[in-house]
Image (cartoon, rainbow, N blue to C red):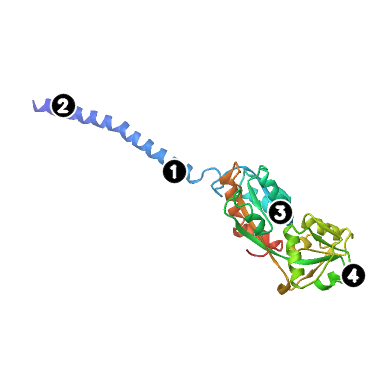
Amino acid sequence: MSLLLTRRRTAAAVLTAALLVPLAACGNDSGTDKAEDSGSSATPSGAASGAPKADLTVLAASSLTDVFKEAGAAYEKENPGTKVTFSFAGSQELAAQVKQGAPADALVTADTKTMDGLSGETGSPTVIAKNRLVIAVGEGNPEKVENLKDLSDTKLKVVLAAPEVPVGRYSQQILDAQKIAVKPVSQEPNVRAVLSKVELGEADAGLVYKTDAETAPDKVDAIDIPDAENAVASYPAATLKGSKHSEAAAAFVAWLSTPAAQKILQGAGFQQP
């Protein structure tokens, strides 16, 4: 009987071991799946930036034309699969587009007044940069313009932006503060149009942003205006409530305040917000 009992115990042990082998194997497979899942979730598509992929349309002030093209390219490089298309115009024109329901995702204006007037159409704005005005004159300053007072000379052909345009409003603000009367030969719809008039020799001088003058160093000279006589332009950026890509738009607006974006903006002559 003892021999039979021993054989039964041996058979039971063998059977138990046989049953445990596949269970252990299943446990190993489960552990492997968890490790693989963990690895894949640690590096999901787009994890480098975390920004959702989308085709974004950004309405931006004319004075941002050059720098935003560079910034947009940098953003697309950091966020593969995202495309940023800009529509540049005077801030007042952009505001009109927003009110008319133009399809866009974000807005950047050259003043807080225009942005504040669209509070029902935008998210909370953030100032991303600042700017100052200069007197733009032809290369070599042929008319020998030295300061704001010189712009009152009736012999000079001076061009300004229209008063409803931010740069036009800033221009009138600093001229009024110095009690300088200027009769412009034309009032332009945006700052780039003012700069163009001076570049083409159709005007002797014009008030533009410092950053705009720097885009045409071979065609115009910039006469600095002392800080005490100058105005500071603020550039707020905000998402548009009508955007179909709200998360991606918010990511782009937030990126404009990052060190990478600020380096591009300041490299173009914009000041820190």
- Image coords of residue 242 (percent x, y): 61, 43
Using residue 250 as the reference point, say whether residue 92 is left or right of it: right
> Comparing marks 3 and 1, which lies closer to the viewer?
3
Q: CA distance from mark 3 to mark 4?
A: 31 Å
Q: Nearer the viewer, residue 65 or 53?
A: 65
Percent position of residue 213, x then y: 78, 62
Q: Which residue is mark 3?
A: 91
167 vs 28: above or below: below
Which of pointers 4 and 1 lies earlier in the amino acid sequence? 1
The disc at residue 143 is 4
Q: Nearer the viewer, mark 4 or mark 2?
A: 4
Q: Considering the numbered disc 3 on the image, is that residue within a helix, a strand or a loop?
A: helix
Occupied quadrant, residue 160: bottom right
Mark earlier in primary sequence (1, 2): 2
> In this orientation, which residue lies closer to the viewer: 170 or 239?
170
The amino acid sitting under disc 3 is: Ser
Q: Identify the residue under disc 2.
A: 8
- Real-space CA distance between mark 3 and mark 1, rounded to the nearest whole angstrom: 48 Å
Residue pointed to by mark 1: 38
Q: Amino acid at mark 2?
A: Arg
Q: Residue at x 12, y 25 (%)?
A: 4
Q: Quadrant of residue 31?
A: top left
Q: Is residue 11 above or below residue 138?
A: above
Label 1: few (<14), some (14–19) or many (≥20) C-alpha neighbours in 10 Å: few
Report, in whole angstroms, how far the alpha carbon at label 4 lies from the one at label 2: 116 Å
Circle 2 crowding by C-alpha within 10 Å: few under 14, some 14–19, many from 20: few
Camera sees residue 202: yes
